[in-house]
Image: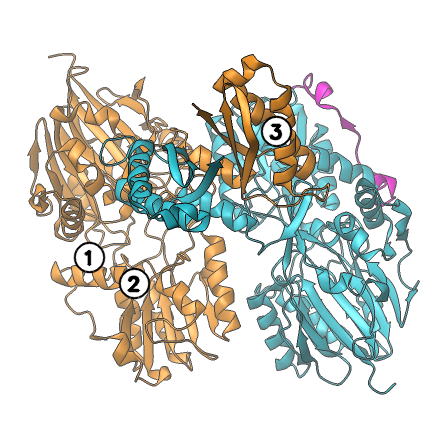
Chain colours: A cyan, B orange
Amino acid sequence: MSNERLIYLPLGGAGEIGMNTYVYGWGAPGKERLILADLGVTFPDMDSSPGVDLIMADIAWLAERADRIEGIFITHAHEDHVGAVGHLFDQLNAPIYARAFTGHHARRKVEEKGHDPESVNIVPAWPEQIEAGPFKVGFAPISHSIPESSALIIDTPAGRVVHTGDFKLDETPLVGEAFDEGFWRGIGKDGVHALVCDSTNVMQPVAGRSEATVGPEIVKLVESAPGMFVATTFASNVARVKTLADAGVEAGRSVCLLGRAMRRMIEAAVLTGVVTDFPKTISPEEAEDIPRQNLMLLVTGSQGERRAASAGLSRGKYLGLELAEGDTFLFSSKTIPGNEKGVIRIVNALSEKGVDVVDDSSNLYHVSGHANRPDLERMHDILKPRMVIPMHGEHRHLREHAKLAKAKGMGSVVAVNGSMVDLTGDAPDIVEYIEAGRIYLDGKVKYGALDGIVRDRLRMAMNGHVIVSVALEDDEMVGEPWVDLMGLPEIGTSGAALSDVLEEDLSQMIGRASRNTRSDDDDLEDDIRKTVRRTSDDEIGKKPEVTVVISRLS
Amino acid sequence: MSNERLIYLPLGGAGEIGMNTYVYGWGAPGKERLILADLGVTFPDMDSSPGVDLIMADIAWLAERADRIEGIFITHAHEDHVGAVGHLFDQLNAPIYARAFTGHHARRKVEEKGHDPESVNIVPAWPEQIEAGPFKVGFAPISHSIPESSALIIDTPAGRVVHTGDFKLDETPLVGEAFDEGFWRGIGKDGVHALVCDSTNVMQPVAGRSEATVGPEIVKLVESAPGMFVATTFASNVARVKTLADAGVEAGRSVCLLGRAMRRMIEAAVLTGVVTDFPKTISPEEAEDIPRQNLMLLVTGSQGERRAASAGLSRGKYLGLELAEGDTFLFSSKTIPGNEKGVIRIVNALSEKGVDVVDDSSNLYHVSGHANRPDLERMHDILKPRMVIPMHGEHRHLREHAKLAKAKGMGSVVAVNGSMVDLTGDAPDIVEYIEAGRIYLDGKVKYGALDGIVRDRLRMAMNGHVIVSVALEDDEMVGEPWVDLMGLPEIGTSGAALSDVLEEDLSQMIGRASRNTRSDDDDLEDDIRKTVRRTSDDEIGKKPEVTVVISRLS
């Protein structure tokens, strides 16, 4: 018994923002009973993952130990915490636990993938605790930018672990439970062994602002707007959507929700009782008949997503509605790094329509959902944990958070994805590195980020693609080589068609090649590839990707 | 004579940041004599232009009128103003004019493309004026983030036009000429017909800060740094590089420049007399022997460029130098939108090495090179032009700048690339739209952005590429169809190899096809493409790009 241990193993979210996937275990080494905190996704981009739909943590390590998993606990309904439950459920097949609003979303995701939605257990908040093997896990309400966000209070044989999930300290969050210092002092009063803690905003030097500070500014803006008023924010930020809607009503406007995610989130919030007094909304058809100065649209697409309502409205008519000179468009949101170009594209398209855009540069119309540095320190001070394990953040955030904790005399460690940390003793100790990768969901198929598929796509995108077809009979060329180009200029510097020059050079090369080369597909392919790359480099200054098709007749 | 007119035609830079290319003309419609202000480039990205090296304005309209071009005037040596002079020189073949530092760079670019560097005329600053057909053009020193930036004073039969180039109002720029209000009052005293004016920072509500405010903060930071001190900034910001180097010397450090652009810019600045007292620097080899607390590196790559010195140092040893725990890395620069991910990648890699990174979030260690809103207003007030034509900026910037000018009673218009504006009268008037596109330089070849080449690359990157080879003899299939995959998963949802399933389905389809279809390459190709896309959609949930190679034997 004496060698039993408490382990913590991030598989996603530690060393990045997004894809939160954290494992805890208790037991003898290699026999730990396991629980999982969150199972999120992250999003692809053209730079590194073109054509990919979603990215999730490689859970191979967990899947091999599926019989040891006691439960999956979801802190809140953001995609980077819950997004993979449907896609990975069949590999884990363990009960999922969440509170009502989060569980509503998790059930839909599980069901969409053909699994029993009842695999998701809807559980009440703390002080209720779920027994999960050696763990007792409770959902402690904490504020964030989505309703019902919860920290996990994980009681273990080594002591209490507080896994914050994403959080901020908001005493007036408008929707969902307020941060309650007394409550958290109670959680900590018998000692906290480890605080595993959100790190995303550790670089922000000033304490965070409450959701309640945003409303009055928005009201002022809406009241001063002469034409239609359109606002976008994260659909899951139900408090903000409600603040915006309330401001519209206060300014005498009818409110219309545009975009599937927006409607779905508000429906879920009403259905699960998270919001009881959301103002009446009208349909896009009804909106068409409202004078524009009496209309407010709340729309999806704050991150510049091309298919969302914001982008649609910026391009032209969207569901019968069209913006015009004198309308106002508010980004009540922050632009996530990497999304700037998409957002700027929308702003300029709106500018072309004469729409006045109010972005987040004033800091008046948006507040973050994460704890800033002074807020993190306050949480440390309230809970007085033996150790702080920074989670959810890029390396720079984890490192800064660990420094902060150590400076205050607490144990800490920078544990990125794949680092198995022994939390049993007085100080955290990395005992093993697990291979922690990423899985790409691409259409209906999942594959590893390093499987070479996306690498080949990036190469075709950078270099273009030449396809060479050659037919041989008895190792002699039949006819001439045939070249197809994709993603390459037709004419090279010689003024001739690139495909003609390639065909000519290949024909000569194959004619001169030894019979040995011609009889060996690998050798011939190799020579063809080299010739194509050399000739292309001469003609167009690029070395393309090459696919060689050799047909052997007879 | 009475129908002669003054025209302004932006071909790049108006409706975007970068690619500055502006045409002015005087004469009867269709017979105007033309001059060009700047000939810049912009940079590609994976989202819209993978594999492309540089982007420049489509100058087809100008090239057709090359015999009417009197000269090309370059305001300053930033790539988005001078970058295309080498690439486009042979289509314009007009004399280029620039001051010494700018001309030094322009000459190198023209020479690299095999043209006579003497095509670039090095000219003195105002009051010197160059006669260029109906125009007299002078280079009026103005401050910016590169030495010798100049506004063009263009005297025309319709009056004086001031083309600002990029500028800020800096009375203590450290390197290059200070902004001199008296000088500009003199320029404006006999009336300015049109102010064609930088708009990039029109959204910035507070007056810009001087370059001189940065130095003292940097000195404090360098003096407090325990280990090696590394700083990156735009290589062309010679004043900043000098400020950094001076701070290093003041803190008792030896200074080493890393990165070709950094060394080249400083060499050019010294050579052209722009800087006379740049501190002595040491080579990377010498730097290896200096204790790290006595060393300062000034490096390229502030925008996260993968091949620059910053990225190299973040990954490991670079030219024999390696960063370590306790070193400090300063971004004395702003991250240009779109470059965030690359910069963050470097910051995190440095964090993994234990390096403390100081970024631009404090606003202490960087100032912009562009005029903010109050600075633009001050310039309007000093010159009192009849009209303000906003240039260099996205649509939102041009629109905001035009509003600002109109609110103060000046004529204005939002003229994006391709808008030919008649400036002759009291108010600007868009009289014609020219097709204004973009040209991609890709290896050795130039082609149009809309030529379909890059579209095909993006499609391959998003969808993958299937290559089908089929051989027929007398319209009957010989052997079986052959399928190659690139950028696609090997195994589909059926558990079989995707290529096998495709070959099987194609074989059946071709077997069932009518003889008419088999005898017609287009029909057969069409059916093959459809079958591949349908089967792939079933198997992997994606519809790939398809290249079909049909060989007809005999």
Residues rendered magenta in the picture: A270-291
Separation of residues labelled 2 and 3 (CA atoms) = 64 Å
Q: Residue shown at 72%/42% (left/top)?
A: B493
Q: Residue shown at 48%/53% (left/top)?
A: B340
Q: Quadrant of the C terminus of chain B?
A: top left
Image location (x, y in percent) of residue A364: 59, 48
Residue labelled with disc 2: B240
Please give left or right for residue A354 compared with residue A387 in the image.
left
Residue labelled with disc 3: B506
Label 2 or label 1, whichever lies nearer to me, is 2
Image location (x, y in percent) of residue A77: 76, 50
Quarter-of-image position of residue A31:
bottom right
Q: Check the residue under mark 2 and report the chain it is in.
A: B
Separation of residues labelled 1 and 3 (CA atoms) = 69 Å
> For this rendering, which residue is in front, B137 or B97?
B97
Asked which secondary structure carries label 2, the reply is helix
Amino acid type shown at disc 3:
Leu
Residue labelled with disc 1: B176
Amino acid type shown at disc 2:
Arg
Mark 3, other Cα within 10 Å: few <14 / some 14–19 / many ≥20 = many
Asked which secondary structure carries label 1, the reply is loop
- Residue A298 in view, yes or no: yes
Q: Quadrant of the N terminus of chain B?
A: top left
Please give left or right for residue B23 compared with residue A338 in the image.
left
